[in-house]
Image (cartoon, rainbow, N blue to C red):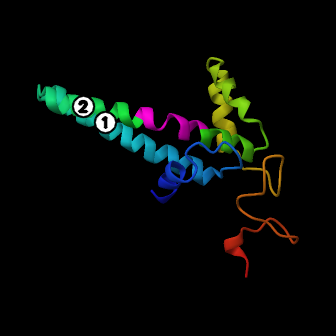
């Protein structure tokens, strides 16, 4: 949850730098949880024939979807930067089937070790090897 809020608060429209797999997938997980929760509220309202509850679910779903368009795009671009690809590769997803699969593979691929064209390694590194900062003694 901390990573999700960090993306929304600190990196809302930050298309520069790199995002680790952990940051990207945690963001996606919590976003899906919120969208599913809003969708369930909407469906419960429809099942109970309550326009107030279904309307509330619809409004929450709309607000979550609208409010997360830019941060979702930004974290996806930073994830592509971590694999040393331009953010413009995001639009390869417009190619039916193949584009989405290719993006999924890139989002799951480990980022470039050390610095790349888009910034320093978010995991950190040193002269000895690629050891994360939290693993240094």
Q: Residues within 10 Å of mark 2 (few under 14, many from 20)?
A: many
Which structural element holds mark 2?
Answer: helix
At 52% across and 51% down in the image, what residue appears? 26
Q: Assess whether mark 2 and mark 1 are in contact (beta carbons under 8 angstroms).
A: yes
Which of the 4 image quarters holds residue 135?
A: bottom right
User: In the figure, is residue 48 to the left or right of 120?
Assistant: left
Where residue 100 appears, as percent x and y from the top left, is 62, 27
State whether residue 94 is above or below residue 42: above
> In front here: 118 or 40?
118
Q: Quarter holding the C terminus? A: bottom right
At 63% across and 20% down in the image, what residue appears? 94
Where residue 43 appears, as percent x and y from the top left, is 23, 30
> In front here: 64 or 95?
64
In the image, which residues are magenta?
Answer: 65-73
Q: Quarter holding the N terminus? A: bottom left
**Residue holding disc 1:** 60
Choose the circle earlier in sequence order: 1 or 2: 2
Q: Is residue 129 magenta?
A: no
Q: Residue furthest top?
A: 96
């Amino acid at each position: 949850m901390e990573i999700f809020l960090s993306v929304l608060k600190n990196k809302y429209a930050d298309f520069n730098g790199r995002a680790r797999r952990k940051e990207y997938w945690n963001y996606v997980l919590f976003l899906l949880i919120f969208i599913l929760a809003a969708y369930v509220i909407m469906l419960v309202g429809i099942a109970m024939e309550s326009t107030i509850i279904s309307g509330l679910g619809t409004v929450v779903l709309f607000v979550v979807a609208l409010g997360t368009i830019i941060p979702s795009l930004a974290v996806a671009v930073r994830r592509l930067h971590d694999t040393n690809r331009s953010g413009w590769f995001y639009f390869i997803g417009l190619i039916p089937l193949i584009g989405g699969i290719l993006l999924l593979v890139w989002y799951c691929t480990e980022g470039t070790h050390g610095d790349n064209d888009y910034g320093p390694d978010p995991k950190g590194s040193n002269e000895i090897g690629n050891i994360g900062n939290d693993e240094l003694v």
